[in-house]
Image (spheres, rainbow, N blue to C red):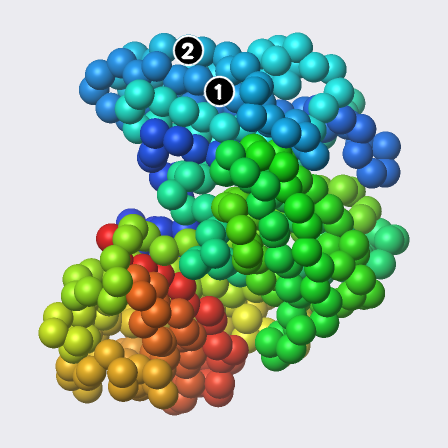
Amino acid sequence: MRQLVTAMVVVMVLAVALPAAALNAATELYVPAASRNAGAYNSQWFTDLFVFNPGTSPVNVDIYFLPRDSDNSAVTPQSFTLGAHETLTLPDVILGTFGQSSASGAFRIVATGQVIANCRIYNQGGSGTFGQGLEGVPASDAVTPAHSTDIIGLTSNGTSPGTFRSNVFAVNTSTSTTTLELTLMDSSGATVAAKSYSLQPYAAFYTTIDDLGAGHFDNGTLHAAVSSGSAIVVGSKNDNGSSDGTTLEGWWTCGSGSGSDGTYHFAVYDPVGAAGGGDVVIAGDTVTAINGAMINYDKDEDHDEEPDCTLLFDVSSASADDFSGHDVSDYASGISYHLSYPASGDFSGGEMTVTVTFTRVGSALVGTLSAVGSGFSGVDAGCNGTFPALALKGGIE
């Protein structure tokens, strides 16, 4: 079955747009975390920054370094000009470009045309490097009093090798003080801890998840909201043995709108990150098409090295043999579709019932995607039974 899954993964990558899992172009971007500093467990961190001009004309780019916990309203940018399709590469950017040998913060990037950006934060040692990447998030996707976000997959369960710690990074994208409200929830959605923080204008922010006072937990979800101002918020899950980190990003809607008809782009997430996505087409408050795909890696009953089933679920009106248009309101309680998987080679084949549940809140879709498999046999028998629901987030473009 592995060959089949591999081929399906390629198809998904080529065919499905993931709005919250790809670099986004804008004229104002924020990279919410950067560091050139000593870290936990004798680690030493560096940051490389990359800015790309995807356009056909030159653009002027101003890059501001925003140190943590300070009013950065008056910081001076470093300025660059990028030609068409040119990439600006700034290795060890905090020292090499901004002249600071020990500092942590964020970057604000303002350009005369749309650019994309990301950075790599890494630990450099004698045996090589390891680290994580963060994308430049458009200022328009910041958390505001009207739009919150959620970060999934946080864990804090010890200090020894084999356990994990989690961190929260944010940057105030406004010229005024931002009040950031963080709420940690368990997998059932129950609140286990909450705390408010005040961020000065354009200030970068960092805290450990332990600062919220939750104690040890696994697979938590962080709800990030602001009661004033605006901010971009991300998380990080770090291995206590190696200090290696995984970036945990929040979600945001794709564009503006107020519940209008159109094509809504969505992504689906397991506890690790994006697992697929696609489009929902709404016309006259009727869902006329669903086109997308996902892979659900969560059904691993034996908790062994290989998942029991990594079958691609083709969640689309084209493949569902019982697809029909439903009112948007019908999806609040879930609409199920039947998918058939014919036998091929050593793949036994079977059937899936995929249930799509969402509500439309303004320009956003928020819901879940779940599946139940049947009729699979042999090595594919792990595809039978109920799969854990995946989170669905999206919005209209």
Residue visible at 42% across and 11% down in the picture: 80
**Residue 141, percent across and down?**
41, 46
Can you see residue 142? yes
Q: Can the viewer see residue 91 in this picture?
A: no
**Which residue was labeled with disc 1?**
63
The amino acid sitting under disc 2 is Phe
Q: Secondary structure at mark 2?
A: strand
Residue 321: percent from the left, percent from the top? Answer: 19, 83
> In the shown orientation, is residue 204 left or right of residue 55?
right
Q: Which residue shows up at 47% across the image and 52% down it? A: 144
Residue found at the very far left of the displayed protein: 284
Quarter containing the N terminus: bottom left
Between marks 2 and 1, how big is the CA–CA gap?
8 Å
Q: Is residue 122 shown above or below 62?
A: below
> Which residue is found at the position 52% from the left and 46% from the top?
229
Vertical order, 298 against 48 (above or below): below
* Label 2 vs 1, first from the N-terminus: 1
Query: In this view of the protein, which residue sits in the foreground, 83 or 140?
Result: 140
Q: Are marks 2 and 1 in contact (CB under 8 Å)?
A: yes
Which residue is found at the position 64% from the left and 42% from the top? 199
Is 175 in front, or is 167? Answer: 175
Question: The residue tagged with tag 1: helix, strand or loop?
Answer: strand
Give the numbered dot on residue 118: none
Label 1 is placed on what type of residue? Answer: Ile
Q: Position of residue 368 (x, y in %)?
A: 42, 74
301 on left or right of 357: right
Label ID, residue 80? 2
Q: Position of residue 139 (x, y in %)?
A: 42, 39
Q: Is residue 313 left or right of residue 120?
A: left
